[in-house]
Amino acid sequence: MTKEFKAASSWDMKEKLYEDLRDPSYAAAYVNEALLEGDEVVFKTAVADVIRARGVGKVAAAAGVNRVTVFKTLKPETRTSFTTYHSLLTACGIDFATRPIKPKLRSRSARK
Amino acid sequence: MINGTAPIAFAAPITTVQHSVTQISHNPQDLRMLPTGNMHDSMLMKLLVYETVSGRRPFVNWFERLDGQRQASVRRRLRAVEEHDHLGDCSSLRGGLYEMRLAGRIGLRIYFANIDGAIVLLLGGSGKSDQKRAIERARERLKDFQDRNSD
């Protein structure tokens, strides 16, 4: 699809994002925000972004996996195991962290 | 329309003209029927931002005024759209306008339209408090986009 539109332009979000992601504290905040969404595809995209920003080869070596498998495991249709996420994020220098929140009560019985 | 005696060759240009009119999807189901991440890259939806006549980009302006944490939460959602056509938690606001709901206490919203099933046009964003005005503005911007692309 090469159709040109008036009143619209492309917006290069990726370049600036990858620049920011090289900062470990931004990368951690980015992944945290993605966790908050509770959506696995969003989370996978974020993890893949951090890995790319850090350099796939470097991360793969640190996690002890093949660089080709890194992105295979992060495809939306693949079921990625917790261990994989953990080893990849650790290799990126990021930790999972939890914090207390007020839980949303979805079902009627839970409110009783 | 052309009458029956006209040469068939004329039919083609006329249909092309009809198709060049920008189609804005009014059916929320269309969004879910779009190709998903396992398709080839060229099938992926492209993100575009709306531009005013004077070249202002309201969505980018809104984004740049957000603090770092909020920018990160907008980015992670839009990256999932870019990379995997994954729109996530969205709802229709009618008239071809949609809102993307971002999780979190702030309740950020991104307003967009789906153009020709191939482009996600970002029209604006808001928090929970300024939502009403932001939706009105997004609607005006979508109308302007349609008007300027209708010839």
Image (cartoon, rainbow, N blue to C red):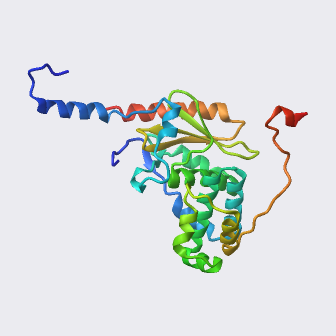
- A40 sits to left or right of B143: right
Residue A56: where, in percent of width, then height?
A: 55, 74
State the image quarter where residue B88 is shown: top right
Residue at x 45%, y 43% (from the top left corner): B54
- Quadrant location of the N terminus of chain B in the rendered image: top left
Residue at x 55%, y 27% (from the top left corner): B94
Residue A76: where, in percent of width, then height?
A: 56, 55
- B41 sits to left or right of B94: left
Count all numbered tags in the image, as a single digit: 0
Residue at x 60%, y 46% (from the top left corner): B62
Q: In this view, does B66 lie above or below B149?
A: below
Q: In this view, does B112 lie above or below A100?
A: above
Residue B19: where, in percent of width, then height?
A: 30, 34
State the image quarter where residue B71 is shown: bottom right
Of B86 and B77, the residue lying toward us? B86
Residue at x 64%, y 79% (from the top left corner): A62
Q: Residue most toward the right?
A: A112
